[in-house]
Image: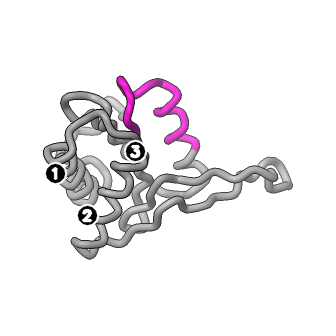
């Protein structure tokens, strides 16, 4: 997050707050220790139950010079058609997770990324612009 962006004027703050709230609810119920797929399933359930628009495993092409590379990337979720959401279940959010989310933002044209890591006793949250 850029140092000149305050948390109260963060882009898509309302949307990311909703997603974070659902993540906290899931973490309260399931705790930590499950595989990523379990948290993705729970999150998809919560998003759909609450009538929030989401696409799971959204495919994106990777442009390079004047071609599209043969390999694609798959964002865990696109929520509200504007937020890249990556789910992790490990010891912590690594620099590679942050870099991955930045690259997803470049390819997707989304303005905000959110990483939720369920692998710790407390939900680990990182907003990315």
Q: Is residue 65 left or right of residue 126?
A: right
Residue drawn at (28%, 37%), measured in percent from left and top?
125
Which element carries disc 2, helix, strand or loop? helix
Measured from the top left, where is residue 93 in percent x and y? 39, 28
Q: Is residue 92 left or right of residue 13?
A: right
Q: Earlier in the sequence, mark 3 or mark 1?
A: 1
Q: Report if residue 68 lies within the magenta region.
A: no
Which range of residues does the magenta coloring cover?
86-103
Q: Earlier in the sequence, mark 2 or mark 3?
A: 2
Q: Is residue 103 left or right of residue 95?
A: right
Q: Are the residues tagged 1 and 2 within 8 Å (C-beta)?
A: yes
Task: Decide which of 34, 48 is in the foreground and name it.
Answer: 34
* Residue 127 visible in the shown view: no
Q: Residues within 10 Å of mark 2 (few under 14, many from 20)?
A: some
Q: Residues within 10 Å of mark 3 (few under 14, many from 20)?
A: many
Q: Which mark is residue 4?
A: none
Q: Which mark is residue 46?
A: 2
Q: Are the residues tagged 3 and 1 within 8 Å (C-beta)?
A: no
Residue drawn at (40%, 57%), measured in percent from left and top?
83
Measured from the top left, where is residue 123 in percent x and y? 23, 36
Q: Quadrant of the N terminus?
A: top left
Which element carries disc 3, helix, strand or loop? strand
Relative height, residue 118 to residue 84 (above, below): above
Residue drawn at (27%, 47%), measured in percent from left and top?
10
Measured from the top left, where is residue 36 in percent x and y? 41, 43
The residue wearing badge 3 is: 87
Q: Earlier in the sequence, mark 1 or mark 2?
A: 1
The residue wearing badge 1 is: 25
């Amino acid at each position: 997050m850029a140092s000149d962006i305050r948390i109260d004027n963060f882009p898509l703050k309302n949307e990311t707050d909703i997603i974070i709230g659902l993540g906290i609810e899931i973490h309260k119920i399931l705790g930590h220790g499950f595989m990523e797929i379990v948290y993705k399933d729970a999150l998809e359930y919560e998003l759909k139950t609450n009538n929030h628009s989401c696409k799971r495993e959204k495919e994106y092409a990777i442009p390079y010079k004047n071609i599209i590379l043969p390999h694609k990337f798959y964002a865990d979720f696109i929520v509200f058609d504007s937020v890249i959401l990556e789910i992790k279940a490990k010891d912590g959010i690594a620099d590679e997770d942050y870099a991955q989310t930045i690259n997803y933002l470049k390819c997707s044209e989304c303005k905000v990324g959110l990483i939720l890591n369920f692998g710790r006793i407390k939900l680990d949250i990182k907003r990315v612009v």
